[in-house]
Amino acid sequence: MPRFTLVYGDFSQRLDEVELLRKQAAIFERSRDSLRRGAEISALCRGAVVLLSSHIEAYVKELGEHTLDSIHTKEVCRSKLAPQFFYHISKGKIESIRSTSQPEKIAQHVQSFVDLEIDFWSTTDPLPAPVSSQSFNKGFSNPSFEKVNAYLGRFGYVKFRRDFFRCLGQDAQTTVNNLDQIVDTRNSIAHGEVSATKTPSEVKQMIETAKIFCRTTDKVFGLWCKQNLCTIR
């Protein structure tokens, strides 16, 4: 069995464009006119952080999509799937029912749920059709550690934090803090905070954090899937 999923391989390749920005910023930083190029260095580093956070988010979503596809194609019995898995399949329809108070509207939403979703709701046999990744991934963005933890919990994986910390040991908390810093910096940049920037060396460390986080996530989630659902590597 491969060491990592194809999703992680794709993520690793996408980091090349982040590294491209970082390297160019580092070249400017070492140049004789580095002071004059301060705005360019900052812009390159800010762009690198935004891209890096986006790639981490994409990795997590694609890992979920890959898992959904594997559950369907490998015909995993629905008796293995957690209750919250079904909720996230039909979250949009369920929330429409919950947010409505008028009987007529409730009936309409329930009928829509029955017409479009009910075939998925069984605890026997494999899924009758592929799950919509767009519906399942809805609500996940800004990949802080706790948000990734909650997202993987949609599959029933409720011990991600424990496994992550066991796998990385004394480096786990530092990795979590650094990951959250990437997301926080990205959010500050998106909100227009001019002071939210990093140096090329700090971006380099962020890239390393992203690799460690996604590599470890790939390892522990892949093992859990193998033991509880199906192989995804």
Image (tube, rainbow, N blue to C red):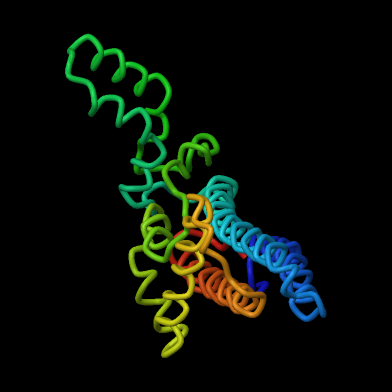
Residue 6 appears anywhere in the view: no
**In-front residue for pair 134/226:** 134
**In-front residue for pair 172/112:** 172
Say which residue appears at 72% left-offset and 74% top-offset: 35
Please indicate whether residue 188 sits to the left or right of residue 124 in the image: right
Say which residue appears at 39% left-offset and 54% top-offset: 80
Quarter of the picture containing the C terminus is: bottom right
Say which residue appears at 46% left-offset and 83% top-offset: 167
Query: x, y percentage for residue 97?
Result: 26, 25
When asked about the image quadrant of residue 98, the answer is top left
When asked about the image quadrant of residue 33, the answer is bottom right
**In-front residue for pair 102/90:** 102
**In-front residue for pair 69/33:** 33
Query: x, y percentage for residue 102?
Result: 18, 13
Query: x, y percentage for residue 85?
Result: 38, 47
Q: Would you place residue 109 above or below residue 80 in this image?
A: above
Looking at the image, the residue that sits furthest to the bottom is 170
